[in-house]
Image (tube, rainbow, N blue to C red):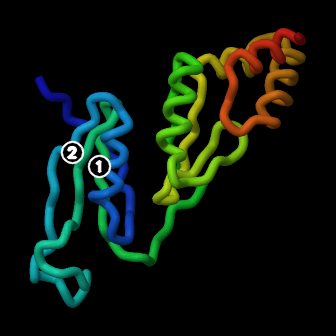
Amino acid sequence: MAIKTKIVPCLWFDDRAEEAAKFYTSIFKGGKIKKISRYTEAGREIHGRAAGSVMTVEFQIAGQSFTALNGGPMFKFTEAVSLQVMCDTQKEVDYFWAKLGEGGEPGPCGWLKDKFGLSWQVTPAMMGKLFTGKDSKKAERAMAAMLKMGKLDIAALKRAAAGK
């Protein structure tokens, strides 16, 4: 039985929605493009797009549905919204950091911008355990280590939290 997603993020692109959807679905196992809709002559005076050009691309990655919209150049991505990729292993961190960062720009603390300008956080799933609990010194050491990193290193974070 198909599960209907109630909340679907819509990602606004100038004119690269289909390219972005193909990029994202190629990175995440099981990713798929579900539907492409196209502009028509109706409303052309408003949208300014050629009839038949891609309007939206519905796609799914990691079980989450998204819509990519070719809406024009007036809106850009900012770090105010990012997508987190929760990783169980360093191998996953390395993979997603490399793939999503391809053609983009690395940032601090596991953040990066992809080649479309969308911000991602490639995050070890175990990070929450390092920053919670009664031992505030453990959290302080882990935070200090994380702040020096671009791509996150699980072993280094664990060593820092342990005081090693």
Residue 19, given in percent of the width and then of the height, sits at 31, 57
Q: Are the residues flagged by discs 2 and 1 in contact, CB closer than 8 Å?
A: yes
Where is 88 relative to 146, above or below?
above
Residue 2, given in percent of the width and then of the height, sits at 14, 28
Q: Residue at x 85, y 30 (%)?
A: 144
Q: Is residue 50 left or right of residue 82?
A: left
Q: Name the kind of residue labelled 2 in the image.
A: Ile
Q: Quadrant of the N terminus?
A: top left
Q: Which mark is residue 22?
A: 1
Indicate which disc, 2 or 1, sits on the residue closer to the N terminus. Answer: 1
Residue that label 2 marks: 33
Spatial CA distance of label 2 from label 1 is: 7 Å
Q: Quadrant of residue 49?
A: bottom left
SS at circle 1: helix
Q: Is residue 40 left or right of residue 115?
A: left
Residue 51, given in percent of the width and then of the height, sits at 12, 78
Q: Is residue 117 left or right of residue 8?
A: right
Q: Is residue 149 left or right of residue 76?
A: right
Q: Residue at x 32, y 29 (%)?
A: 29
Where is 10 relative to 127, above or below?
below
Point out the residue furthest to the bottom here. 45
Q: Residue at x 61, y 53 (%)?
A: 105
Where is 51 relative to 8, above or below?
below
- Viewer-proximal residue among 133 and 50: 50
Q: Name the kind of residue labelled 1 in the image.
A: Lys
Q: Residue at x 23, y 50 (%)?
A: 58
Q: Quadrant of the C terminus?
A: top right
Residue 71, given in percent of the width and then of the height, sits at 33, 71
